[in-house]
Amino acid sequence: MSLAGKIFSVLAFILAVFYVGITTALVSMQDNYRTQLAKAEQKHVKTVEQKDGLIADWEHKHNAIDKEARLIDGKNRMLAAENQELRSEWAEANALTTVQRNIIADQDQEIKRLDAQVDSYRTNFMDANADIKRLGGVIAGLEGDKKALIGARDTFQERLTACEKDRDNALKEIEKLTEDVTRYVALLSDLREQRPDIYAELIRKDIIEPKKAIRGKVTAVDQKLGLVVINAGQRNDVRKGYQFIVFRGNKYVGKVVIDEVFPDVSAAHYSRPDMAADVEVGDDVTTKLAVDF
């Protein structure tokens, strides 16, 4: 064998060993990536959709690395064929060697880039885990708020049911009161016609001066019978015999006297001849004039 042939053989052997080393390193790196990916999939199978997206992205990048590795294998096979040709032509061998060195340098840069991407993916993966834990805390807090709101809703429903019962009872009491007041007004009318002196004395004694100003509004009225219902009752310290002044805006309407008192409403009567105008629903009432309507 000539000297040139020996040189070609040595160069071919060196290149073959160098390429085998590169291929082994890439395959080892590929196995490491696969092992890391398998562990990550086992640890995070039951994570949320965001983590699944990160794992899917990781698999996409891993497939890209496999594709690049297959491309490198193809290039290595091409280089092996070119090494056969280098044995016959020295000039072509030098040119091909230079080209292959450049390719190796590019592959080193690509490996460094892939390592940086792997580090970036690992950092993003850790950040995603932290976000998942934080979201878990937020979800737990929202669950607590939900339970509290459900309890408040149930409590409100119970109170609403109780209020509806009280309203029904109040309506029944008002109906009964209307009947009693009707009879009472009829008796007062007869008394006024037959004994006006006793009537005046009775009305005067029934009027009681309250200790503090009480105000409200007319919620119902029977102008024919002179009956009035106001939205103030026992809870507002209203008592039987209290006298309320009735206003409509800045207009004086007249006075009404309380006949019956309930927890939240009261029933009163008035004499139409003594009124400046008929009482209407929505009129303001007060026990004292020093009240801001």
Image: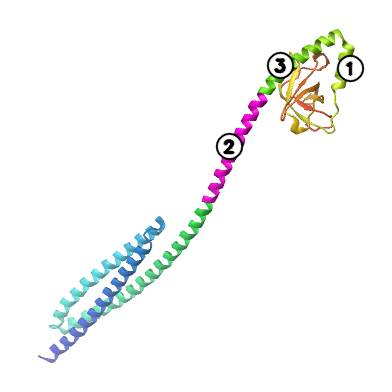
| Foreground pick, 201 / 89 | 201
Q: Tags 2 and 1 in contact by the CB under 8 Å rule?
A: no
Q: Quadrant of residue 224?
A: top right
Amino acid at pointer 3:
Glu
Q: Is residue 12 left or right of residue 276?
A: left
Q: Within 10 angstroms of label 3, few (less than 14), some, or many (20 or more) residues?
A: few
Q: Which mark is residue 23?
A: none
- The answer to whether mark 3 and mark 2 are in CB contact below 8 A is no
Q: Amino acid at mark 1?
A: Glu
User: Would you call the spot at circle 2 few (<14 residues within 10 Å), some (14-19), or many (20 or more)?
Assistant: few
Above or below, 220 relative to 146:
above
As helix, strand or loop, the secondary structure at mark 3 comes to helix
Find residue 157 and name its label.
Answer: 2
Report helix, strand or loop for mark 1. Answer: helix
Q: How is the image coloured?
A: rainbow
Mark 1 or mark 2, which is nearer the start of the sequence? 2
Q: CA distance from mark 1 to mark 3?
A: 24 Å
The stretch drawn in magenta includes residue 145: yes
| Element type where label 2 sits in the image | helix
Residue located at (38% from left, 58% from top):
46
Left or right of residue 179, residue 64 in this image = left
Residues rendered magenta in the picture: 143-171
The residue pinned by badge 3 equals 179
The image quarter containing residue 109 is bottom left
Instruction: Please state, as top left, top right, bottom left or bottom right, where the C terminus lies in the image.
Output: top right
Pick the residue in front: 248 or 85: 248
- Magenta region, mostly helix, strand or loop? helix
Q: Which residue is mark 1?
A: 201
